[in-house]
Image (tube, rainbow, N blue to C red):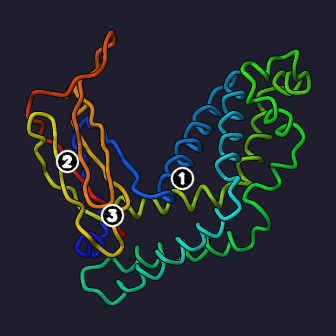
Amino acid sequence: MVASLNKLAISPALPMSITYEQPLNERIRTCLRLEFLFEQASHAMLGQGATDSRNTLSCLIDTLNVLNRGDLKAEFIKELERLETVLSRLTQSPGVDQRRLAKILEELHSLRDQMLATSGLIGQELRNNELLNCVRQRSSIPGGTCDFDLPYYHYWLERPHRERTQDMQTWLAELAPIRQSTDLILHLIRESSLPSQEIAASGLLNKSLVQTTPPCQLIRVTVPASLGYYPEISAGKHRFSVRFMQLHMDRRPTQSPDDITFELTCCAL
């Protein structure tokens, strides 16, 4: 981990590869869910139709539900402070790109200050928005946001694309500090360790988790896209397993009989 941090470099991924990730604690699990939702919302906003706007709002509402925990802001502030402390120790280490390190530390400090300046729950302003509240209350009902159920929503969806986009950009801007914090935390943790080549004999690898301080937070498995198998990752406190499975559309997946070579990264920072 120290060597990886000193270099502050990303190991190149396999060409045409797929990376599967398994979080090992609730904080990283939340970050991955937020990253997924923000990416989905940004992608949906590229479209110009009413369905695209519906998808954007669906992701936005799911994001607010994830952020509903009262202690989440404090958890993110604590994590930003922890990373700032850890990386500050590298300022005198040889081989470190000091300009890049200084930029990362400045960003961590700025995001922490933005989070501290936020009052109440993250996204509280959005929870007070009448349109979003209407949609949110009906979203738990299958088909509950149908046009006849929410004429207010139907009216908004029929507005010009430019106006809808402005509204959505404004709403997502309210969540910019948490999105930027999520992106930076995951970026640093993914960079914290270098991958190793592993072989899953007959499609299965069992491995002990090396006890480090801090402990491993994220397991990443990278395989060629052409492999034909996908990994199922399960982990406990001391051990984890990677089992490569073959998908069958008409029956349950089966474990690979072949030895599978893949890249494994146990991320700890």
Q: Residue shown at 36%/56% (left/top)?
A: 218
Q: Is residue 207 left or right of residue 45?
A: left
Q: Are marks 2 and 3 in contact (CB under 8 Å)?
A: no
> Which residue was labeled with disc 2?
263
What is the residue that sits farthest to the top in this orientation? 250
Q: Residue at x 82, y 39 (%)?
A: 132
What's the distance in space between the residues labelled 1 and 3, CA to CA? 16 Å
Q: Residues within 10 Å of mark 3 (few under 14, many from 20)?
A: many
Which SS class for mark 3?
loop
Distance from the alpha carbon under mark 2 to that under mark 3: 16 Å
57 or 144: nearer the viewer: 144
Q: Nearer the viewer, residue 18 or 146?
A: 146
Left-right relation of 122 to 258: right
* Residue 236 found in image quarter: bottom left
* Residue at the outermost bottom position: 92
**Identity, as a three-letter code, of the amino acid under mark 2:** Glu
